[in-house]
Each structure stands twice: as C-alpha cells, then as structure tokens.
Image (cartoon, helix red, strand yellow):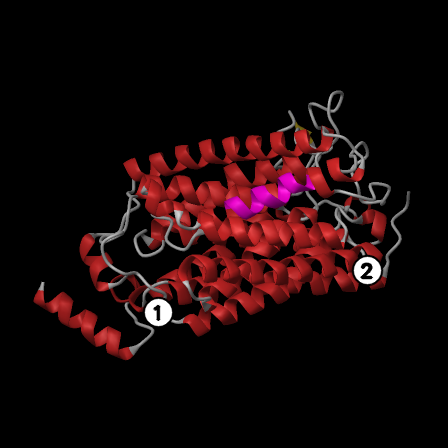
Amino acid sequence: MEFELDSGNTAFIIIAASLVFLMTPALAFFYGGMVRGKSVLNMMMMSFGALGLVSLIWVLYGYSTAFGTDVGGFIGNPADFLGLQGATDDQSLMAATGVPFLVAAGYQLTFAVITVALVSGAVADRIKFGAWLVFAGLWVTFAYLPLAHMVWGGGLLGGGWFLADALPLPIDFAGGTVVHINAGIAGLVLAIVLGKRKGFGREPMRPHNLPFVMLGAALLWFGWFGFNAGSEFAADGTAGRAWVNTTVAAAVALLAWIGTEKVRDGHATSLGAASGIVAGLVAVTPAAAAVDTWGAIAIGLVAGVLCALAVGLKYRFGYDDSLDVVGVHLVGGLVGTILIGLFATDTDATWYPEGASNGLLYGGGAGQLGTQIIVALLAMVFSGLVTLVIALILKATIGMRATEEQEVSGLDLTVHGETAYESLGAGARVVTEVK
C-alpha cells in the first residue's frame, strides 16, 4: 500500500512528541525537589544528561535496534536505519495512520529518554555523574532497546508472542512493561548494587523544595497526555479515550494516596499528592485505551493505595531507593499491566493486538490475565538481569559510587562546581576547607 500523508495525524504526533519530550525536564523538577538542597543540580543533570545521550544513541542505532527487522525475537537489526537513514515513509511505524517515518521515530525517541531518566531517582545523592552517563548508554542499549523490540517491535513479548497458541496476545498500550516495569526493576537492582546513602534510616532526608515537586508533577501530568493519547498514533476517539482515562486514573490515585496517608499518618501531604498523581499516570499507561472509565477509576484507586504503601518497603527490606522509583514505577507498572487482565474491554478496537481478549471481569476469561502476569514477570527478569550485569561490571571497573566527602558536602559543588543556593555553596566550601 502506498503511503498517504495525513497532515492532521502528523501534526497530532508532533505535538504529542513535544509533550513527552517535556516530561524529562519535568522529571528533573520532580526529582530535583525531592532530594536535599546540596544535590539538586546533580539530580537534575542526570535527567538532562540522559536527554542528551539517549537522543544521540536513538538516532544512531537505537531506533533500528528497537524497530528494525526482527533478529531472533529479541532485537531489531541495528544496521537497518543507521542515523535514521534509508527508510521510506512506507516503513513508518505509523504508516497506517499517515504519519511519516521521521515523525514516528522522533516520537519513540522521547519514550527512550524518559525511561532512562526515571532510573536515576533510585540512586540520587551518591552515584558518580560520569558513571551514570556510562550506565545510561549501556542500559538503553542492552535493556530498553531489546525490551522495546520484544513488546512493540514484533518480538517475543508482542506481535511474536511465543505463547500465542495457548494465551491471548499481551496488551501494553503505552509502556507499562517497556517503560515503567523496566525502569522500576532497574532502579531496584542499581540501588542495591550501589548501596545505601550515608545516614540512610538514621537521619532525615526530606525533600528540600516541595513546590519543585508539585511543579514537576503538574508538568508530568500535562506531558503524559502526549505519552498516552499519542500512543494511538492518530487524532481519533481512541486517543480521546486514552486522554480521559489518563486524567481519571491520575485524579483517583491522587485522592487514594492522600487518603491512605490520612488514615496511616494523620495528615495528607503535598508530596503524597504529587506522588499519587504520578502513580496513577504510571498505572494507567499500559491500559489507557484498553479499559473503560470504570476500569480507569479502579486502576487509579488500586495504584494510589498500593504505591503509597509500597514506598515504605525500602525501610523494611533495607534497600535505599532514594526517590521511590520502585514504589511508584515498578509497583504502579505492575498494577496497570496486570489489571488489564481484569478490565480490558472493547477488543474489537482497531489498535488491539489481533488475538487479545477482554479481561476477566468483561467476559474474556482468565487468559488475558495470565498473559499480562507472564509478560510482567518476564520483563522484570530480563531487565533485572541485564541491569545487574551492567552495574557489577561498572562497579568493578570505573566505580560507580561517589566518595564520602562528595556525598557529605553535596554533589552539586564537589562534582559540578556550582550550587543551586548560595548559602549552601558557602556552607559546603567551609566543610571542604575544614577537611
């Protein structure tokens, strides 16, 4: 079929890509506000560093590795579209909706960037900036790109589902496995390998700027409309359904999180409200167009409660997930991915994978639920093992942990030679001179 440009859909995807691109600077504010004031710039630099590095990798070989010709079900051929060259618009991921190759490739670039940036929150305050950049480059190459191919590029966990004769095809509308489970389990493994921050569990490590956190959450919510609605690849009713479900799930999760805080702690916090928004957005991502409004409400409610409870697991089990990547992204991603198996509906919609079924509560039986659980577990195992290998190699070679002096004085001044706040800079200089 000859490619036919649809200018409306093309404009829609360019706008959606710009919204998702905004999510990485938004994450920098969200994470930056959550750390202590002496490391806020370092935290933000990890997001911006990922933005620069992953964007370059994506256009060089990343797109080809994720969406090139299938190689064994695990990766695409990295040589297919080196430098995004050699492709026609007929080969666009969105050719069926009239969106050119480069626009589709640019949209997917923004997903890769934000996924890598999400991982940084688990290791705030203590990782070398250079080591972070090396890790980011290796992780996007060996974890994100293969998983994106396996789920979205026709590999083993998507169109080439290896259990297709026994179970329905998996549903992941916008990235529950590829983005959130992937980043969440990577954050957990990296935090364990890197070790706890000095003073973790013994001294308070409160967010230094809650308005930053709230601003970041608001911008993430805004950008998420490009993330979820844009994943329809067209400006149509399904995109509208994804927009509404995204809003509803985030709103309900916000209320569920602060309600859980009120019952547990006696007060609802702004940090809880911001975290609840993100938890709801994470959970609805894989299900944004796969469920109706009632399903979105249920997903937001479950995510808000479970993620609020899950962020405390790091104290019980002793891993230092600095900014709750595990509690929000891993748990939220699991909630959304698995609950599709209960709430998926309207599988006659054109975007549904052929062979997917309605959820258990909508007359589809338990098959889709089984598929969603298996895919979630496989994504965790794959990403966890890849992350562990990369982290152990880097730890044994270049080293990943900042020095104790850098950690105590703050990474902003000792690593980047600048501070967000002049008073902190003066204090850090005094500490350094005394030592």
Q: Residue furthest right?
A: 1
| Amino acid at the residue labelled 2 | Ala
Residue 83 or residue 57, whichever sits in front:
57
Q: Which residue is mark 2?
A: 235
The residue that appears at 62% across and 60% down in the rendered structure is 252
- Verify whether residue 332 appears in magenta: yes
Residue 156, image x and y in percent? Answer: 66, 28
| Amino acid at the residue labelled 1 | His
> What are the residue bounds of the magenta stretch?
330-340
On the rendered structure, is 133 left or right of 400? Answer: right
Q: Which mark is residue 208?
A: 1
Q: Residues within 10 Å of mark 2 (few under 14, many from 20)?
A: some
- N-terminal label among 2 and 1: 1
- Verify whether residue 174 appears in magenta: no
Residue 429, image x and y in percent? Answer: 18, 71
Cα separation, mark 2 vs mark 1, equals 40 Å
- For the N terminus, the image quarter is top right
Residue 75, image x and y in percent? Answer: 61, 32
- For the C terminus, the image quarter is bottom left
On the rendered structure, is 66 left or right of 279? Answer: right
Vertical position of residue 59 compared to residue 158: above or below = below
The residue that appears at 21% across and 52% down in the rendered structure is 403
Residues marked 2 and 1 touching at CB (< 8 Å): no
Residue 5 lies in quadrant = bottom right
Vertical position of residue 361 compared to residue 32: above or below = above
